[in-house]
Amino acid sequence: MASTITEKILANASHQKEVASGDYVVTDVSYVMAHDSTAPLAIESFYKITDKVFDKDRVIIVFDHFFPAPTVAGATMHQKSRKFVMDQKLSGFYTNGVCHQLLAEKYISPGDVLVGADSHSCTEGALGAFTTGLGSTDIGGAMATGKCWFRVPESLKFNLTGSTKKGVYAKDVILSIVGDVGAAGALYKACEFTGGYVKNAAVASRLTLCNMAIEMGGKNGIIEADQKTLGFLNGRTGKIFRSDPHAAYENEYEIEVKDIEPQVALPPVVDNVETVSAVEGKPIDQAFLGTCTNGRLEDIEVATRIVKGKMIARNVRFIVSPASEDIYFSAFEKGYLQDLVKAGATICNPSCGACVGRHEGVLCEGEVCVSSQNRNFSGRMGSPEAEIILASPATVAASALAGKIVDPRDYL
Amino acid sequence: MRAWKFGDDINTDVITPGRYTVTTDRKRLGEIAFIEYRPEFAKEVQEGDVIVAGNNFGCGSSREHSPVAIKAAGISAVIAKSFARIFFRNSVNIGLSLFVCEDADKIDDGDTVEVNTKTGEVHDKTKGIVIKAKPLPEFMQRIVEKGGLVNFLRSDGYDNV
């Protein structure tokens, strides 16, 4: 039987010759991840099941949603998770990056199964793995057993061909797709990205594509591993699976990326996608560059190129949070962070607190933020009366300079 | 029991805004359910009331705080045209009853409804109609019958799957 890459990975991890969409399977999990916001509930569930994790090197805790703690309540959550890390002698405990970026850099290999207590765990599927987000009780169960159950999803194929225009990036491509497919258009499905555009895309861009599979309701985002993937893995190997030519897809989307213009997602939902021209000139109060969607070196590089030697608008704060310590160091060595600071940006520690409204960039009533993040829900970054507009790092940086939403192509 | 009606794509930031989820205290989470989107909800909801919604209920974050808050507020069941997948799993895992029902639209806010959690029949007493929800897949029913994932794993676990 012809199978998709998702079906092959789930068959391998459940020790079966093959599985088909609709089957229920119990798989081994390669890694289990929780972050500071979701770990405390997972730990409560875990201790109701057992008192020892299945493998101290495969359970990973990352503090990124509110680190360093901005409130007493946050510090109390951290204390609880830190005790778990120490009691269970976990080797993987990090406070220096966004969980999905750290997992991509340090752990995930092709063929792995990752379950993460964060909905954007679909990101790491860009490395040819099955990676998905779950809630805390599921994660507590996986920490205890090293296993998890899944319904094998139907697959959607997104065949992306051609090259983007100047000033158009992976973020614009995935926003355009989310706008077309809709917030529930891929509900419960595997979202497989393939085609010439994906093959030519850097791993960073592939991570951006897979990151937003959940914004269409998808179960996982996935891209077959190739030489670029292996180059990114820093010596890790894994097991490479590929979809068979005649594998069954529930739907196949043919997308010519040269037709895509710079995109924005307007509040209050991610599939409310327009071209940037629809809101050109709208004044902004904050520009945010970072997160598991777009906090990587290529994102910081393009933003730097746009603002270097200039000054951001006086009434705008431009907040930059590199997605990991490695990216932070690279951006520093290349002089990007210095150029950004000179242009008026504020550099925060590698984390994602602003995207979830915890700290380092909270919005008040009536404010507008253009952000490289993945969600624009009401209240996400602070006041429910604030507006969040999603865009590419280039659009974010150019808008910070202009003090209003602009087309980045005029600034490149 | 009163029906609380919601629309499509009700997301986890609407149910439990991230700024309020810095706790695992059930009672506190019950008090913050829909705190900004529908402030009267947590104040007026009665034990046993039901939520009726459109498509993709619970989309967004994986935060389990959302179904926990709904359950802690006293809601006995959520009836929707469809659910986001992580929210669906989370609810099964913590024992919040969910029903997928294409005719959820027929119920209006404030209607008096009775849900038979065994058969999936929803009786709208205000309108005098009975609508039928889809039963859970058999695999998930086994988890629900054990009272959620924790009890499932404490008993047979995955050994007999």
Image (cartoon, grey):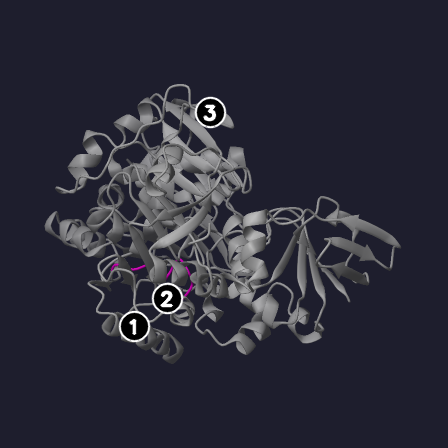
Q: Nearer the viewer, residue A5 or A38?
A: A5
- What whole-number distance in Å separates the C-alpha atoms at marks 2 and 3? 37 Å
The residue under label 3 is which amino acid type?
Ala
Q: Locate residue B87, reporting x and y percent.
A: 53, 55
Q: Which mark is residue A39?
A: 2
Q: Locate residue B64, reporting x and y percent.
A: 49, 62
- Contact flag, marks 1 and 2 (Cβ < 8 Å): yes
Identify the residue position indicated by label 3 in the image.
A248
Identify the residue position indicated by label 1 in the image.
A84
Q: Which mark is residue A143?
A: none
| Magenta segment boundaries in residue numbering | A350-359
Tag 3 or tag 2, which sits nearer the N-term?
2
Tally of marks: 3
The residue under label 1 is which amino acid type?
Phe
Q: Nearer the viewer, residue A325 or A245?
A: A245
Instruction: Write down the quadrant of residue B36 in the picture.
Output: bottom right
Left or right: A14 in relation to B66: left
